[in-house]
Image (tube, rainbow, N blue to C red):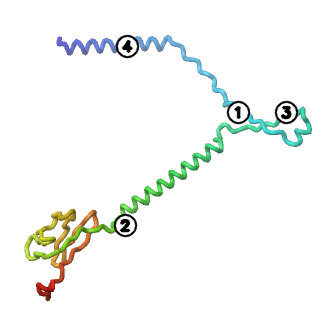
Amino acid sequence: MSKNQVQQLVVIALLLVFVGVWTLMRKNSAPAPVAPVLPPKIESIPVPASPPAAENPEAPPATLVRDPFELPSSLLDRIRQQEEQRKREEEERRRQEELRATPGGPAQPPVELPDLKLQAIFWGTANPQAIINRQTVSVGDTLEGVKIVSISKNGVTVSINGQETELKPENNIGKSRNDR
């Protein structure tokens, strides 16, 4: 027999001993006595004597019985306030989700572009290019923190912080070098 088989036999023997002892213990033990369930104790709140009881000083003071399942009014008020706060927060969260779900998203303040001057557009090739601030750029390039989104024959669309704007070429047609 291998060492592994011996270990398995020992584990099985121990389990059989444990189950046997447990079974004997259960048969020999008597069921535990069940404690009687008592009704909840009802508090009595003394009430000031009413005018008829004041006439009869020997009458016992009247008492009000408080419902043990009713929460005190101060606790009820606090629960109502917490529930109202939770509803307000839920409504604000829902409103924010609706704003994020709209195609344009929430209205964002306009972003100020760096000083970019579109000087030329090379449109006739498979990969259109433009010259902006004396640098040649293609679609997907970044220049001064602004991403080039598209280049068309009418202008260049750029994006900064998710907001897009279009750069138009300067209209220099008909002007001499001295006029520019």
Gap in angstroms between the C-alphas marked 1 and 2: 60 Å
- Disc number lying in front (1 or 4): 1
Pointer 2 or 3: first along the chain: 3
**Amino acid at pointer 3:** Pro
Q: Do the residues labelled 4 and 3 touch (CB within 8 Å)?
A: no
- Circle 1 packing at 10 Å, graded few (<14), some (14-19), many (20+), is few
Q: In which quarter of the image is the N terminus?
A: top left
Q: Quick one: SS at disc 3?
A: loop
Residue marked by disc 1: 42
Q: Residue at (63%, 23%) from the top-left corner?
A: 36
Whether residue 117 sits left or right of residue 44 in the image: it is: left
Q: Which mark is residue 18?
A: 4
- Disc number lying in front (4 or 2): 2
Residue marked by disc 3: 60
Q: Quick one: SS at disc 1?
A: loop
Pointer 4 or 2: first along the chain: 4
